Amino acid sequence: MSGDGVSVVLVHGAWADGSSWSKVISALSAKGIAVAAPQLPLMSLSNDVDVVEQVIERAKGPVVLVGHAYGGAVIGACTSSKVSALVYVAALAPDLGEKVTDVFYRSPPHPMSPQLAPDIHGLIWLPDGAFARAFAQNASDDELAVLAAVQRPIAPACITSPVDSPLWKKVPSWFLIAEEDRMIPFETQRFMSERMQAQVWSRSVDHTPAVTEPDVVTDIIFEAIKAVKR
């Protein structure tokens, strides 16, 4: 399929950067779809939203906005009228007045989930080994090496700020539930997707399917694109 003027903006989550979308970018580009993957500073939610809004402003045509993990909070906080569909990939979707931490810690953590705390600089990093144990347990050794090498820490200000009324209340949404997720519990993802009244895809994938099962991610994005074109 071709985008026929629809653009896609891919928003990464905590402990990642735009390279985590590389396989999805290749698949979308091969179909002639314009795609961008901004790099989030991860210093505050409002700053990250500003970065994404600037990229949306430059995009041509209607936009399918895709968020992974923390990136779900970012896309939900965007306000651009160019956004015609939202796609949540194992993502967090806080409601009005909620913080990212409210939904992240809504359910008991997976036994393999890492302990998270700020370092002496006030930044939260994934502990050693957490990429292999919880973030992307289905990834290859080479993929894990890249994920660890490009890791970007997140500041507490990103996850402790209450959000305004989210965009998913106004724009059609799709949600890929990661059934093997060890970072965001399945029950939490199901709760958020039902609350959003999203089109739900539930698949046996880990927390980072853009790396480990990119075809599943591109397929749900294609569904959103088709809906926008209709």
Image: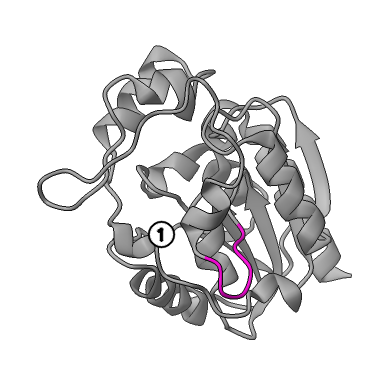
Snapshot quadrant of residue 38: bottom left
Q: Which residues are magenta?
A: 93-98
Q: As drawn, which residue projects farthest toward the bottom?
A: 81
Q: Position of residue 69 (x, y in %)?
A: 53, 48
> In this view of the protein, can residue 9 be seen by the observer?
yes
Snapshot quadrant of residue 95: bottom right
How many numbered marks appear?
1
Instruction: Look at the image and tell me in which quarter the C terminus lies.
Output: bottom right
Q: Position of residue 37 (x, y in %)?
A: 45, 57
Q: Is residue 119 left or right of residue 183?
A: left
Determine whether 134 is above or below 38 in the image: above
Which is nearer the eye, 116 or 22? 116
Q: Circle 1 sits on which residue?
A: 159
Determine whether 139 is above or below 171 in the image: above
Mark 1: which secondary structure? loop
Residue positioned 65% across, 75% down in the render: 167
Q: Residues within 10 Å of mark 1 (few under 14, many from 20)?
A: many
Q: Is residue 64 left or right of residue 17?
A: right
Residue positioned 63% across, 74% down in the render: 166
Determine whether 37 is above or below 209 in the image: below
Which is nearer the eye, 5 or 168? 168
Residue positioned 56% across, 80% down in the render: 164
Q: As drawn, which residue projects farthest toward the right?
A: 230
> In this view of the protein, can residue 42 be seen by the observer?
no
Residue positioned 54% across, 42% down in the render: 26
Residue type at tag 1: Ile
Q: Position of residue 168 (x, y in %)?
A: 70, 70
Q: Position of residue 56 (x, y in %)?
A: 51, 75
**Residue 55 is a magenta residue:** no
Q: As drawn, which residue projects farthest toward the left?
A: 120
Which is nearer the eye, 42 or 39? 42
Q: Is residue 175 left or right of residue 61?
A: right
